Amino acid sequence: MKIPFVKGFDEAALDKYLRNTGWLMFGKALALVVALVIVHHLGPHAFGDLSFADALTAIVAAVGTLGLDTFIIREIINNPLKKDEILGTSLALRMGVNLFLIPLTIGIYLLLHSLSDKPGNPLTWIVLLLSFVSFFKSFNIIDSYYQSQVQSKYVVHVQNSCLILSSLVKILLLWLKTPLIWFAAALTFDSLILALGLVFLYQSQGQNIRNWTFSRSRAISLLKQSFPLILSGVMVLLYMKIDILMLKKNGSTEVGIYSAAARISEAWYFIPSAIISSVFPAIINARKTDMDRYNKRLKNLYDLLVFISLPVAIFVGIFGNEIIHLLWDMEYEGAGPMLSIHIWSGIFVFLGSASSQYLLAEGYTIIAFQRTAAGAVINILLNLWLIPLYGGVGASVATLIACITTTFWIIFIPKTRQQGLLMLKSLFMVSLFQKFILLARSTK
């Protein structure tokens, strides 16, 4: 069946996306099922502790990416003979920063922890374990290399194999009924085996990581270019994760109930990234030759993302409570209304992912930072107001408003307003209605 939005719009690229990510989607589905069982096994309080530690380490780890992914791809495409220097410099930068972030994360936790979570208690060790995740993710630069060679299918196979292995390990932990800290170790293990898998892939295809070199001038150049994206990445994680940290004042159980709802709501956020990475090269090529086609393809991409996300938001928004009860009975009572609100954020996450690539393609990195900063500030302010009044429901509302703000911030900036209006038209399905009207007229 053909989707009306994508008629004539890089259908080959979409077919390629489906082929390359079919197994990855299977792996993601398996990982989600295992995650839902883990949520049930741990219960709201323990799962709340794990979610808090994960959110804290993820926010700090956002600095460790150094915003380099996009620039690594661009640098390798522009200077293929400097591949080893670019990859070696990027890896050294990431590993160095992420090593520094490990004690920093522990220090931040010790400043934030409650009186009951003294140093040496399980949650301290959980934070320590999870702080190593970003260090192992330094090797994700190999993924960027394969993207630059339009060979992401190899990375997909590695990711899927790691997802399946990780799921089997977690199933074993569930069978053994292990305590919370083992599941934190399993999350760290996920990033470790992916790093090893990427290195093995790179080495097995005739490449040699030992040939990588470090260049001080290259490091300075990369950091100068990526600095706005470092700040932007931190802001993205802030407005996506800060609610969990701020909910901790209401207790670990409230954090666990909210995190359970958010886990379901966010389970499919990998889909827009996969679609966009497949079709955006064709959009960029259109920009070089035909601006009208460029804007049309962007509009079609926005239409497609709304076409995918809106029905899910409507369905889960209506049946959120029933979904929670079906999965966990009454154990996570109260998560249903949170899920029914939080799921609507997905529409704006989808659109925001696409428009972020547009901003990078146009060189508007400062605008990308501005809009994520606005979303983070609004989310924090709304959480300060709504969480004391409504708990997790208030956090869900704050997240939704922050996502809307971040996505449509570009409407208020003259040089990006057109893209904001295109997204707004897609959100209200203007193209679909126009096609239906034309179809109705043609059948008269």
Image (cartoon, rainbow, N blue to C red):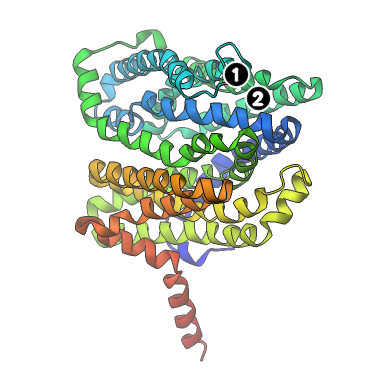
Place of residue 242 in the rendered image (x, y in percent of width and height, measured from the top left) = 46, 37
Q: CA distance from mark 2 to mark 1?
A: 8 Å
In this view, 440 is above or below 157:
below
Residue closest to the far front: 115
Q: Amino acid at mark 1?
A: Phe
Q: Which residue is mark 2?
A: 166
Residue closest to the far top: 210
Place of residue 75 in the rendered image (x, y in percent of width and height, measured from the top left) = 27, 28
Place of residue 50 in the rendered image (x, y in percent of width and height, measured from the top left) = 61, 28
Q: Which residue is mark 1?
A: 189
Image quadrant where residue 33 sits: top right
- Residue drawn 44% across the image and 19% down it: 105
- In primary-sequence order, the first of circles 2 and 1 is 2
Q: Secondary structure at mark 1?
A: helix
Left or right: where 12 falls relative to 83? right
The quadrant of the rendering that contains the N terminus is bottom right
Left or right: where 365 falls relative to 54? left
